[in-house]
Amino acid sequence: MLDNKNLPAGTILAFDFGHRRIGVAVGQTLTGSSSALAVVAVTGKPDWQKITGIINEWKPVALVVGLPLAADGGETTMSTDARRFGRQLEGRYGIAVQYEDERLTSFSAEQRFVNARARGDMRRKDAALKDAMAAQIILENWLQSAI
């Protein structure tokens, strides 16, 4: 497993795994910055072709997958599924996968979306981007723990 305290400078991709959509965010280890990037559809299985395109475009040095743990920190069915997705990512692309506790990220993403709508930066039709915003929060938290 990759130690995020000794990461090489480069791009990191984060994934907020879901059974219908996967949010994707991109960030940099050098600057500690991140942004929401995309939403990938899941219809029985993730859209691996789209994920491959994102991986090829951004050439990340590491991948981060949000881990939806229970309130007490224990595993859930979704965290088991997210770990499976992480193993698939690592197996397909040969890039180390890290996991980040994502408790409360959906709530934070919803708040960011509401605030962006209030500012006029987003519209109701952009609601699917909440998954990418959740991935951004996962990546922000992971990058902060790396510093």
Image (cartoon, helix red, strand yellow):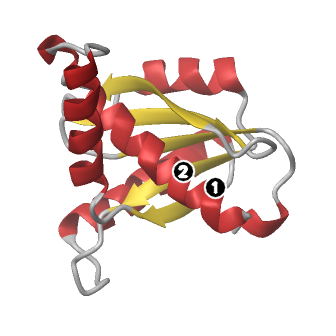
| Pointer 2 with pointer 1, Cβ within 8 A | yes
The label on residue 66 is: none
Tell me the kind of residue under disc 2: Glu
- Residue 25: x and y in percent read 50, 34
* Circle 1: element type: helix
The residue that appears at 46% across and 41% down in the rendered structure is 136
- Callout 2 crowding tier (Cα within 10 Å): few <14, some 14–19, many ≥20: many
The label on residue 143 is: 1
Tell me the kind of residue under disc 1: Leu
- Which residue corresponds to mark 2? 140
The residue that appears at 23% across and 43% down in the rendered structure is 111
In the rendered image, is residue 57 in sight? yes
- Residue 38: x and y in percent read 41, 23
Asked whether, in this view, residue 123 is left or right of residue 23, the answer is: left
Quadrant (top left, top right, bottom left, bottom right) of the N terminus:
bottom right
Along the line of sight, the residue nearer the viewer: 93 or 73: 73
In the rendered image, is residue 22 in sight? no
Along the line of sight, the residue nearer the viewer: 32 or 120: 120
Asked whether, in this view, residue 90 is left or right of residue 110, the answer is: right
Outermost residue, front direction? Answer: 119
* Circle 2: element type: helix
